[in-house]
Image (cartoon, grey):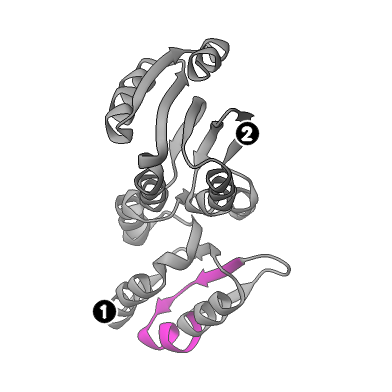
Amino acid sequence: MIACTQLPDTNILDISLSGAVTREDYETVLIPALDKALEDNDGLRALVRIAPGTDYTVGALADDAWMGLKHWRGFERIAVVGRDGWIGKALKGVSILMPCPVMLFEDGEGEAALRWLQESLGAIHQTDLGDGVLHVQLLGKLDPSVYAEETEDLNAFIRANERFRLLLDIREFDGWQGLGAVAEHLKLVRDHRSLIDKAAIVGDRKLERFAARIGGAVIGAETEYFDGDLDAAIAWIKT
């Protein structure tokens, strides 16, 4: 069976699976709950609790695939509690391919899973340094919702500066959460790279130096990497 409850004053849908999960459970409980929650929220975070011994019928598996295709853009983050059995193993295998961050927790770690859903995984800070220079700092692990929140600020800066120079600080950047975040990042670069006259990238790891070379080729503008030296990067980008 499936039970769904939206936690009060949040965009978190608590989904519990136990016993035999059937096509009827999907059609009468889960899918209507998702549709209703997506009507009320731009994005959802799901807390999926899988009780020990939970099993799917063939019909439920087909509905699971259909539901994923229809609703995947609506999920910001998914926490799955219960890794035992073939369901948990299957989720572990496909989690890296999901378009949103997915974290797997052991049975009994529901509170930790809920904290993970509620915490901020990453952030983007944008600062106008004047003279057409935009300082962008990437922090932690970024998910798609972070890009959505920052796009309007970036567009406002671009409206005030037809062309600009980019100072990108990735010293505290830990990567992306899910393929959806990577897609949002690439879309942001694609949409604005033609407006960048010059780019400085500040990092402090060898991998970041390599990434900076790739980033410079993608941006298509003069690009310089600075090993942990923000002041030198600011001086260079403003000349």
Between residue 71 and residue 13, name the one nearer to us: 71
Q: Position of residue 45 (x, y in %)?
A: 55, 62
Q: Which element carries disc 2, helix, strand or loop?
A: strand
Cβ–Cβ under 8 Å for marks 1 and 2 = no
Q: What residue is shown with label 1?
A: 58
Between residue 184 and residue 101, name the one nearer to us: 184
Q: Residue sitting at 37 percent across and 75 percent down? A: 70
The numbered mark at residue 108 is none
The local crowd at label 1, few if under 14, some if 14 to 19, many if 20 or more residues have their Cα within 10 Å, is: few
Q: Residue sitting at 36 percent across and 70 percent down? A: 68
Res 216 quadrant in image: top left
Q: Is residue 218 above or below residue 20?
A: above
Report the mark closest to the observer, 1 or 2: 2
Q: Amino acid at mark 2?
A: Thr
The local crowd at label 2, few if under 14, some if 14 to 19, many if 20 or more residues have their Cα within 10 Å, is: some
Left or right for 81, reference 181: right
Q: Which residues are magenta?
A: 12-30
Q: Position of residue 32 (x, y in %)?
A: 50, 85
Q: What residue is shown with label 2?
A: 127
Between residue 223 and residue 147, name the one nearer to us: 223
Mark 1 to mark 2 CA distance (whole Å): 52 Å
Q: Which element carries disc 1, helix, strand or loop?
A: helix
Between residue 39 and residue 162, name the one nearer to us: 162
Q: Residue sitting at 63 percent across and 33 percent down? A: 127
Q: Amino acid at mark 1?
A: Val
Res 208 quadrant in image: top left
